[in-house]
Image (cartoon, rainbow, N blue to C red):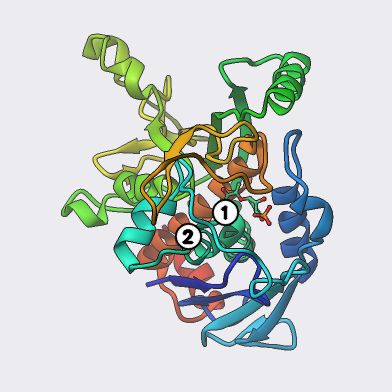
């Protein structure tokens, strides 16, 4: 089993992660991890923090030379904007953010204590872990990519920029939709035997866990619900060169909780970021008086970056399911088993 955990606050000293369950003998290309971290920082509409940070990973444990040892891999990313103890307290919860529920849950009156960990800064560690999983998956020809489909319902690049500029001027924020695709995934990852083994359930949970994601669909998703079965199910074909394959991919590469060999296609809906330059009404956490929600430095829109995070979450889940199916100790052995599949 591949396990992943992170720790770190947005303005703390650093973000740290542990990825456990990788096979021994995997060559970890730190340059590739750093490229992925840079991709997470990009996209029109990102905020001021991205001008401060230049995220780069330090591998702390689990690697000798450049190769994994089979032991847990630990890594860290420094926060240049390390100032957690100098930042002022926050008493005006932002609608749409973890602020209020988090403060009630943990008994804080200063919501700084919530937002520091609830911040999407944490996703930097997911991308570091996900890129290590991508390195593993590419040994087997599996690749994962994302595209931003729309921002605030708009698909044209220039119009998207205009919408983001307008939102910035008006102190607003914008959500959108991105798609993540995994190609060359072998048949049979996941299982139909229990809810928690289903690959679609595992992918769904991983993608839903990305901050601001409010909906995930696979393949034809919601559209499939309004069509007859004869128009939705993917006809099975066979050729010597391809083996079994499908005429269409409405299932998004997933049938019965398993990969079916077609491209896995997930689409995620991201709500607009909760921090607004022109804040919504709220209630002061102590006085209970009407106030405006707090305004923090933030992004206007981060749909492209969320796509990169989506790739990482997909990579972690697919790597886990892959190791489950083909073995997980020694990369050489896994390659032998994989050839026999
Ligand atoms: C982010 C870091 C944060 C935010 C953003 C994403 O940094 P700061 O709070 O210092 O500006 O820019 O997080 C949010 C929008 C949020 O609501 O949490 C990052 O590294 O991705």
Asked if disc 1 is less than 8 Å from ligand 1, the answer is yes
**Quarter-wise, where is residue 220 in the image?**
top left
Measured along the vertical axis of the image, is residue 137 above or below residue 311?
Answer: below
Quadrant including the N terminus: bottom left
Say which residue label 1 marks: 120
Residue 300, above or below 328: above
At mark 2, the secondary structure is: loop
**Residue drawn at x 80%, y 66% as measured from the top left:** 31
Report the side of 255 relative to 274 (left or right): left
Q: Are marks 1 and 2 in contact (CB under 8 Å)?
A: no
- Image: 189 above or below 213: below
Q: Is residue 133 visible?
A: no
Residue shown at 75% from the left, 19% from the top: 157
Q: How far across and how far down the image is residue 175, in percent?
A: 56, 29
Q: Which mark identifies residue 182?
A: none
**Crowding near the residue tagged with mark 2, few <14, some 14–19, many ≥20 C-alpha atoms within 10 Å:** many
Q: Nearer the viewer, mark 1 or mark 2?
A: 2
Q: Secondary structure at mark 1?
A: helix
Residue 114 rendering spot, x and y as whole percentages: 46, 62
Q: Is residue 10 above or below residue 282?
A: below
Q: Quadrant of the C terminus?
A: bottom left
Q: Report the side of 261 relative to 295 (left or right).
A: left
Q: Residues within 10 Å of mark 1 (few under 14, many from 20)?
A: some
- Residue at the (56%, 38%) spot, across then down: 273
Can residue 329 be spotted in the picture?
yes
Give how far across and how far down residue 12 sits, in percent.
64, 73
| Percent x, y of residue 13 | 68, 77
Location of mark 2 (residue): 111
């Amino acid at each position: 089993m591949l396990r992943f955990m992170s720790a770190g606050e947005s303005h703390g000293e650093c973000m740290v992660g542990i990825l456990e369950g990788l096979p021994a003998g995997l060559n970890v290309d730190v340059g590739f991890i750093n490229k992925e971290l840079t991709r997470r920082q990009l996209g029109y509409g990102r905020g001021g923090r991205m001008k401060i940070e230049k995220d780069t990973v330090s591998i702390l444990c689990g690697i000798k030379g450049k190769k994994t040892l089979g032991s847990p891999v630990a890594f860290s990313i420094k926060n240049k904007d390390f100032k957690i103890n100098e930042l002022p307290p926050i008493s005006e919860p932002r609608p749409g953010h973890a602020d209020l529920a988090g403060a009630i849950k943990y008994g804080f009156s200063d919501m700084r204590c919530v937002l520091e960990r609830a911040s999407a800064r944490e996703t930097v560690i997911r991308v570091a872990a996900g890129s290590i999983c991508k390195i593993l998956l590419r040994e087997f020809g599996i690749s994962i990519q994302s595209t931003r489909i729309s921002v605030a319902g708009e698909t044209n690049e220039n119009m998207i920029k205009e919408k983001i500029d307008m939102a910035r001027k008006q102190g607003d924020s914008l959500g959108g939709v991105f798609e993540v695709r995994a190609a060359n995934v072998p048949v049979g990852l996941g299982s139909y035997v229990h809810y928690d083994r289903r690959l679609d359930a595992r992918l769904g949970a991983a993608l839903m866990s990305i901050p601001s994601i409010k909906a995930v669909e696979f393949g034809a998703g919601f559209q499939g619900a309004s069509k007859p079965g004869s128009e939705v199910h993917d006809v099975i074909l066979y050729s010597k060169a391809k083996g079994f394959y499908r005429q269409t991919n409405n299932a998004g590469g997933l049938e019965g909780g398993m990969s079916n060999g077609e491209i896995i296609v997930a689409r995620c809906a991201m709500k607009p970021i909760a921090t607004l330059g022109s804040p919504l009404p709220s209630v002061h956490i102590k006085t209970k008086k009407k106030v405006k929600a707090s305004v923090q430095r933030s992004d206007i829109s981060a749909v492209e970056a969320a796509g990169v995070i989506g790739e990482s979450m997909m990579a972690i889940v697919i790597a886990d399911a892959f190791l489950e199916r083909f073995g997980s100790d020694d990369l050489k052995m896994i390659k032998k088993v994989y050839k026999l599949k």
